[in-house]
Amino acid sequence: MRERRDIVSGEVLPENRLIRFVADPDGNVVPDAAAKLPGRGLWVEASKSAIDRAVEKKLFSRAAKAQVTATADLAARAEKALLARMIGDLGLARRSGALFLGFDNVLRELLGPKPPKALIEALDGSADGKRKLYAAAHRLELDCAVIECLTSAELGLALGRENVIHAAVQPGGLAERLTFDAERLSGFRPRNESPRANASKIESKS
């Protein structure tokens, strides 16, 4: 994975912990979640605190070596851009048949010949169901990424149904991109102790 220098901390970080910004033709700093917009890339750690600091300390102008405008809502717009990418990719996964929904379907896929590459659990979902799925993945020694940065409402918006708690994505480019963006979006979301860690502890004792 490529690395970039964070203009706030000066640290060199992998791109899955950063978000790119560019200055538009009018000199306004805009988030570039896909890292495809033209212009000099200004990389910041993907978190509200880091982006807010870059705005407050006028670090975008320093890094760009030009006077640019970064507004106070820049962190919120960056989060929104990352969320939009994930919602779009989840929709693509559903339409392509690479997505499985519901506890029973996810568990069946974990036990199947082509297990999913990414487990998606609603941020506000029940910890008990998550622990059971994580324990199953751990017992089977599956290398599954865990995505736990979207609420059930956001998952429902992406997938066109209510009360989405458990989902999984087959191996492939969409699973990789969702995992990449989830790492970045997590910097804007609350972090609780993962039920996955607890599941591993439970399994090791059994």
Image (cartoon, grey):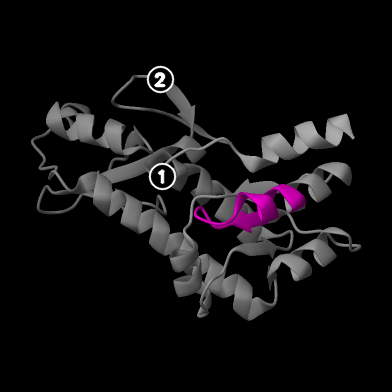
- Asked if residue 127 lies in the magenta stretch, the reply is yes
Q: Is residue 132 above or below residue 7?
A: below
Where are the magenta residues, as a range? 119-132
> For the residue carrying disc 1, how many other residues have a C-alpha within 10 Å: few (<14), some (14-19), or many (20+)?
some
| Residue receiving disc 2 | 11
Task: From the image, tell me which residue sits under label 1.
Answer: 189
Please tell me which residue is depicted at 47% across the width and 69% down the height of the picture: 88
Dot 2 amino acid type: Glu
Q: Residues within 10 Å of mark 2 (few under 14, many from 20)?
A: few
Q: Which mark is residue 161?
A: none
Image side of residue 93 versus residue 13, left or right = right
Secondary structure type for disc 2 = loop
Quadrant for the C terminus, please: top right
Q: Is residue 60 visible?
A: no
Position of residue 91 relative to residue 199, above or below, is below
Q: Quadrant of the N terminus?
A: top right
Q: Position of residue 96 (x, y in %)?
A: 66, 77
Residue in front for this viewpoint, 148 or 202: 202
Residue 194 placement: quadrant: top right
Number of marks present in the image shown: 2
Q: Position of residue 35 (x, y in %)?
A: 40, 50
What is the distance, in whole Å, between disc 2 and disc 1 at their CAs?
22 Å
Residue 53 in picture, x, y percent from top left: 21, 29
From the viewer's perspective, is 145 left or right of 44? right
Amino acid at pointer 1: Arg
